[in-house]
Image: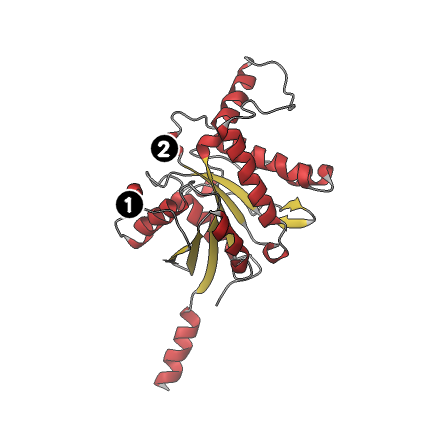
Amino acid sequence: MYHLITGLYAEWTKKARFNVLMVGPSGVGKSCLLEKIKSLYLQRTALPPNKIAPTVGQNVLEVTLPNMHLHFWDLGGSASVRALWSKYYDESDAIVWVVDARHFLALDAHKQKQQQGDIKGKGKASEPDAGSEAYNARESSWKLLSQLLIDPSLEGRPILIVANKTDDCGSISPDFARTIKSWFAEKITHTDADPADATSKLSLQLPIHNGNVFADDEEESYRSPVAAGSRLNDKEYEWDVILASAIEGTGVHDAVDWLSFRVQGSQAGVR
């Protein structure tokens, strides 16, 4: 009887385990972000950035939350490692795509000038920093992400875009997260076979708090509902953008909260 009761108790209290795949271009701070998650959730001292070598394979971290385990796979962004990304897709319950927030500063500055009336017109013939290093980095990142999105193994998986390195962005506008999300939404719209339908699904209705479109747990009034998916080649994705700093830790709790909330409704989940 004792073994029966303890077995039933263990089954009742067993937590679901979800796999989170963290990927993105090289040099955007994926491993630093994982170190900060480890520091905040496991109360371990994070390695200083200058001690973190570029990932040549994978880094693994498991975080235990009140109602689940989040198992993170951080994969390197070099060409040789990118060839291995797809081997993790089937077992992934969510994707974290990391970008360098500094590559979007020119877009945000341009948008602010437009809103202030310093720039006339809103034509999109070219981006304000076209041809620059930041522009090329954005385009390269999008090319990699779009290849990931069309993989059928990831259909229905929530995707969180984390704009890292905000600590090195200086003064940013309150709309910075929305500017980045608008840029990705525009890319998705132009990729989709039915732009009009995609545009309707990409309307940005999420509130912004402290520069993020998803708020802390303690600020329940800012908690955004589960949003409609975004189409890409007839696939549905729930996605969002969060600003973060792996150095200062800003946005890291927001990111983990977003993932824990979304993976519960994903199609997979290792139990």
Q: Residue at horizontal 62%, vertical 24%?
A: 126
Q: Is any atom of residue 262 visible in this view?
A: no
Q: How far apart are labels 1 and 2 at the CA level?
A: 19 Å
Q: How many marks?
A: 2
Residue under circle 2?
A: 167
The secondary element bearing badge 2 is classed as: helix
x and y percentages locating residue 64 in the rendered image: 37, 59
| Residue lying farthest to the front in this orientation | 80
Q: Amino acid at mark 2?
A: Asp
x and y percentages locating residue 36 in the rendered image: 34, 46
Q: Residue at horizontal 29%, vertical 41%?
A: 50
Residue under circle 1?
A: 51
Question: Is the residue under label 2 in contact with that under label 1 (CB below 8 Å)?
Answer: no
Q: Residue at horizontal 49%, vertical 29%?
A: 133
- Numbered tag placed on residue 104 in the rendering: none
Q: Amino acid at mark 1?
A: Lys
Please tell me which residue lies in front, 212 or 95: 95
The secondary element bearing badge 1 is classed as: helix
Q: Is any atom of residue 159 visible in this view?
A: yes
x and y percentages locating residue 77 in the rendered image: 47, 47
| Residue lying farthest to the left in this orientation | 45
Please tell me which residue lies in front, 216 or 135: 135
Residue 213, placed above or below residue 3: above
